[in-house]
Image (cartoon, rainbow, N blue to C red):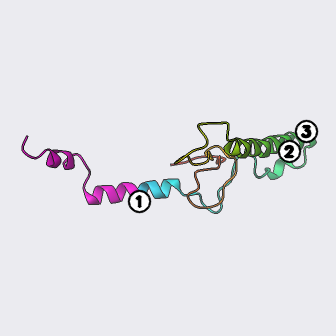
Amino acid sequence: MEKPEMALLMCFPSQIQATKVMAVLDVLSNHSPDEEYLGEKMEPAWEENEAIRGAFERFNGRLKKLEEIINERNKNLELKNRVGAGVVPYELLKPFSKPGVTGRGVPNSISI
């Protein structure tokens, strides 16, 4: 093989292909400002039923506790997989998120 670097470059996508993939990934990764997250909003029909409202509030409380646990573990210096050079905090399953690409939040539903 005369030019192995050319063989390697032929494996990569063209600029237009890479741009299309980046655009699709950006669209699919963005959280919409009106996106609803698991346990964030109670259905209006549930508000009247005491048992359902109580269960929802307990579930929502557990989700908030889960977020606190994730934050505590991210700060724990004894967890070697969570600290050190180049290690970003774990946020993937934090229940709630803000709009944009955040890498966190569990949506109420997903449609692609």
Few, some or many C-alpha atoms within 10 Å of disc 1 (few <14, some 14-19, many ≥20)? few
Please, what secondary structure does the residue beneath circle 3 have? Answer: helix
Residue 26 located left or right of residue 78: left
Between the residue at mark 2 and the residue at mark 3, the CA separation in whole angstroms equals: 10 Å
Task: Please say if 80 is above or below 10.
Answer: above
Residue 53, quarter of the rendered image: top right
Q: Is residue 22 above or below residue 60?
A: below
What is the spatial separation of the Cα atoms under label 1 and label 3, in whole angstroms?
45 Å
Q: Tell me which numbered mark, 1 or 2, is placed earlier along the sequence.
A: 1
Q: Position of residue 55 (x, y in %)?
A: 86, 39
Magenta residues span 1-22
In this rendered view, identify the residue nearer to me: 22 or 85.
85
What kind of residue is marked 1?
Answer: Ala
Residue 95: x and y in percent read 70, 47
Residue 12 magenta-highlighted: yes
Residue 54 percent across, percent down from the top left = 89, 42
In this rendering, position of residue 56 left or right of residue 24? right
Res. 67 mark: none
| Most frequent secondary structure within the magenta stretch | helix
Which residue position is annotated with label 2? 57
Pointer 1 residue: 23
Contact between marks 1 and 3 (CB within 8 A): the answer is no
Relative to 88, does residue 20 appear above or below in the rendering? below
Q: Which residue is mark 3?
A: 51
* Amino acid under disc 3: Ala
Per the image, label 1 sits on a secondary structure element best described as helix
Foreground residue among 69 and 107: 69
Q: Quadrant of the N terminus?
A: top left
Q: Indicate which label's residue lies in the foreground, 2 or 3.
A: 2
